[in-house]
Amino acid sequence: MSSYSDAFEQVIKECDEHNLQLQSLIRQAEQNLDIQRARNEDQFGAVIHHLSLIRNKRCLMAYIYNREAIIQSLRWKLGSVLPQEILVKLHNLEIEYFKNHSEALESYMIWFLQRIHIFDVCLGDHTVALTKNSLHFLRRSDAETFISQVL
């Protein structure tokens, strides 16, 4: 965890340095409004610092997006409680995101389940009575037919 956090902090520091250099070059350019006398090195330096900021921003966004996708997949694979060996590898904000994502997902599931109608289903030569908190084992072909009828 600390190596990820350290790398993240290092990129943020680099962005701050690029921003300071860019602001300094912009102030110099504002003082020398004579375009013909302006130094090309300053103009190119400003472009390099600006492009470096954009690159770092894209890298950080890709990193955050990837971590977010991993956290969401953990919820589907492991449920709403993460093992300790995974928790120690997550940042506090990532743990908070996991909890919020779990709550939103559970809320949606409850909302969805409240809207499912309970009724009997006729599957060929037999009937299945669907009641709350009941568990049924059906062939996939029978279940697919039923699901397509419900949807």
Image (spheres, rainbow, N blue to C red):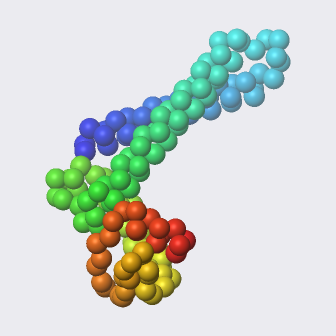
Q: How many marks?
A: 0
Q: Quadrant of residue 133?
A: bottom left
Q: Nearer the viewer, residue 26 or 58?
A: 58
Q: Nearer the viewer, residue 115 or 61?
A: 115
Query: Residue at (38%, 46%) from the top-left corner?
Result: 67
Query: Residue at (36%, 49%) from the top-left corner?
Result: 70
Query: Residue at (48%, 81%) from the top-left corner?
Result: 116
The answer to whether 85 is drawn above or below residue 12 in the figure is: below
Q: Nearer the viewer, residue 22 or 33?
A: 22
Horizontal side of 3 relative to 145 (left or right) equals left
Tell me where residue 148 appears, x and y as whole percent: 52, 68
Tell me if I can see residue 151 in this picture. yes
The answer to whether 25 is drawn above or below residue 102 in the figure is: above
Horizontal side of 53 relative to 104 (left or right) equals right
Q: Quadrant of residue 2?
A: top left
Dividing the image into 4 quarters, which one contains the N terminus?
top left
Tell me where residue 137 appears, x and y as whole percent: 28, 72
Query: Residue at (46%, 72%) from the top-left corner?
Result: 146
Horizontal side of 101 relative to 57 (left or right) equals left
Dividing the image into 4 quarters, which one contains the C terminus?
bottom right
The answer to whether 28 is drawn above or below residue 36 in the figure is: below
Tell me where residue 107 appears, x and y as whole percent: 43, 76
Tell me where residue 50 appears, x and y as whole percent: 61, 28
Tell me if I can see residue 16 in this picture. no
Residue placed farthest to the front in the image?
Answer: 125
Q: Quadrant of residue 32?
A: top right
Horizontal side of 6 relative to 26 (left or right) equals left
Residue placed farthest to the left in the image?
Answer: 85
